[in-house]
Image (cartoon, rainbow, N blue to C red):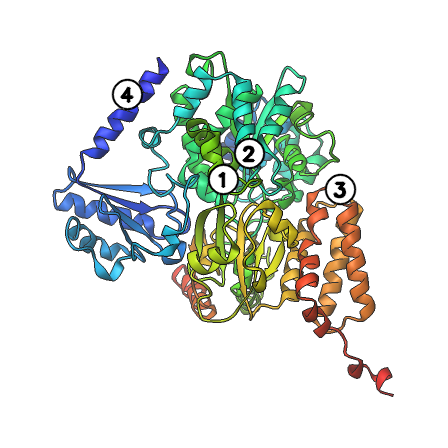
Amino acid sequence: MPSTRTDNRSDDHQWTAVDRTMQRHDYRPEALIETLHTAQERYGFLESNTLRRIADRLGVAPSKVLGVATFYNHFRMQPAGEHTLAVCTGTACHVKGNDRILAWVKEHYALAPGETTPDKRLSLVEVRCVGACALAPVIITDGEIIGKKSFAESTTAIREWLDDAA
Amino acid sequence: MQRETLQHLAEERRRYLAGFDHHLLVCAGLGCPGNEEIVAELNRIVKERDLADRVLVRRTGCMGLCALGPLVRAEPDTIVYQGVRSEDADEIITALGREPVARLLLPPDLPFFTRQSKRVLALCGRIDPDNFDDYLAAGGYTAVITALTAMRPAGVTRLIEGSGLRGRGGAGYPTGLKWATVAKAAGERKYLICNADEGDPGAFMDRAILEGTPHAVLEGMIIAAYAVGASSGYIYVRAEYPLAVQRLKRALREAERHNLLGHAICGAGFDLKLEIRLGAGAFVCGEETALIASVEGGRGLPRPRPPYPAERGLHGCPTLINNVETYANIPLIVTRGADWFAGAGTERSRGTKVFALSGKVRYTGLIEVDMGTTLGEIINDIGGGTPDGLALKAVQTGGPSGGCIPADLLDTPVTYEDLGAVGSIMGSGGMIVIDETTCMVDMVRYFMQFCMEESCGKCVPCRVGTVQIHRLLGKFCEHRATPADLETLETLCNLVRETSLCGLGQSAPNPVRSALRFFRQEFLDRMVQPADTPEHNS
């Protein structure tokens, strides 16, 4: 089937990039985290099959690869939704009321941090301080920082973003 | 030979820059969203009006006053515009050399600018971080040339020891002493690492330095590597800082291209290879042994010290680990001397310190002050006090490892010793202002939740203790705590502090201990009152 062939080709293309990262480090085990970064960039998330291939290539036990992948917050084992809303949970954002915004998002979209809506449209993530504390409270819509807004302005911005993005 | 080449490039760049009547510097830091559109619009109008040979639009790092951004600076008139939008571009260009645009003008005598003492940040917001020649033109890399061609490694280390520079990552260990230990350590192979894993929530000094003057950090690292005899090194930077990573990568390529990294640097018999390693979102990796484990590709688990990394670090070799701001201070000390450096600050805390000022303060942003400046001067003079007239309650320094300093201690000078004496720490430089609307019990519970979630789980006191402290604090938040809970809380805090394996656990109780010291009444007010319990009523 043509579509499958395309998928395979695209998968090969992504894997080549992952392999290139490992090659740059002479396939040494210490390349593991760098490789996981490339894999997540390419595939969007870390599938168990990808982890197994990386383990194989670097000569690292699959259990160790899984251990590393799950130790760090940055790596995700599930595909992200079409859009990602990140709410900064840094101290300045906390003091400026981001817990209220987070609670609103949780309720309004029936989502917990780390989850994606059943229609795969929106993923919600909590992020540790992104270092834009002077703009607190900060939310990030598909990578774009929105700050210096009140609770009402922030929730409006989220609603408009999701409508606009439809 | 290389000295001449670099000097030539610097002079050429200076001549080029001097050829323009006006420079428009646009803050292209993370704290000024929308700056790309402003740059594009300014450039479009410059072209449209045929001003390309008179007006130069340049992107820079953070100018500091993020609260009023996006900022645009017009040179040589030293005018700063605030809250600029791309629609303002036309007016700004028309006003060049004439009356400035009044509605956007920032008062030139604003204490936010006049009360600071910029050394590490002197070039941040003044040069294009992506332009190697810009850094050269501002005197960059002359310290590397001086150190590598006119000084011996031991002489560089002695200079840093003499300056009294202490680590800017938080603990304040004497930098020169650390260098001397690594230099003396036995071993063929030595490493150097830049800790750019700025994990404290509320801290963004290192991000701003990396985004604004990445070459200054590289320059400091090259000098350090030469002094301790390291031939390869890593910059361990948070994945949450994509812009800093991008600028750092470019800076590395430029430095390699100009033989400031690589083989036989500056014609001296000295080689250095630097690589970037991306963190992956683990606060514990700010701890040096956990960071090393992460650079080695594993989980970021700390190990007991000694042996310290200076003796046995990366791959078991002697390893020098310094923080971003520490490295950024090095070129200045080499160029200007130890006495100049010690001219700012106090006897035991010399030089300046960069702080990230945020929370309930009017002028949030990035600042640099002489050590010894009081918290009050920082918050009220530079920061302009609280924004809506609410009473200031406390200032939090040191993040989840620090403490809250109450408003009546605002005359505390920022030095390693004085902040320690009031139960907090210098930390890496996050400073969060808290007003009367914030409940301290809620605040410390927030920090404890952070430590609980970030505990790596290796040692029991931290893994279990943080969960139990968090649970106890929850009882206070819900007004369910008893006097016995208060006693348990204090006991647990001491236990976790004294028995945890690494700095994360040892310092995790600090916010609680500090709040219990200065805001005890808030805890007492949140306990079960005798009248609330039926058994006491009967």
> Label 4 marks which chain's residue?
B
Query: Looking at the picture, do discs 1 and 2 lie on one chain?
Result: yes
Q: Amino acid at mark 4?
A: His
- In the rendered image, residue B467, in percent from the top left (x then y), is placed at 75, 56
Report, in whole angstroms, how far the alpha carbon at label 2 lies from the one at label 4: 34 Å
Q: Secondary structure at mark 3?
A: loop
- Eye-nearest disc, 2 or 3: 2
The residue tagged 1 is B351
Name the residue furthest bottom: B538
Report, in whole angstroms, how far the alpha carbon at label 2 lies from the one at label 3: 29 Å
Q: Amino acid at mark 1?
A: Gly
Badge 1 vs badge 2, beta-carbon distance below 8 Å: yes
- In the rendered image, residue A162, in percent from the top left (x then y), is placed at 44, 62
Q: State whether residue B360 is above or below residue B36.
A: below
Query: Looking at the picture, do discs 2 and 4 lie on one chain?
Result: yes
Report, in whole angstroms, how far the alpha carbon at label 3 lies from the one at label 4: 52 Å
The residue tagged 4 is B8
> Label 2 marks which chain's residue?
B
Report, in whole angstroms, how far the alpha carbon at label 1 lies from the one at label 2: 8 Å
First in sequence: mark 2 or mark 3?
A: 2
- In the rendered image, residue B388, in percent from the top left (x then y), is placed at 44, 70
Along the line of sight, the residue nearer the viewer: B77 or B276: B77
Q: Amino acid at mark 2?
A: Gly
Question: Where the C terminus of chain B falls, by quadrant?
Answer: bottom right
Q: Secondary structure at mark 4?
A: helix
First in sequence: mark 2 or mark 4?
A: 4
Along the line of sight, the residue nearer the viewer: A29 or B106: B106
Residue B164: numbered disc: 2
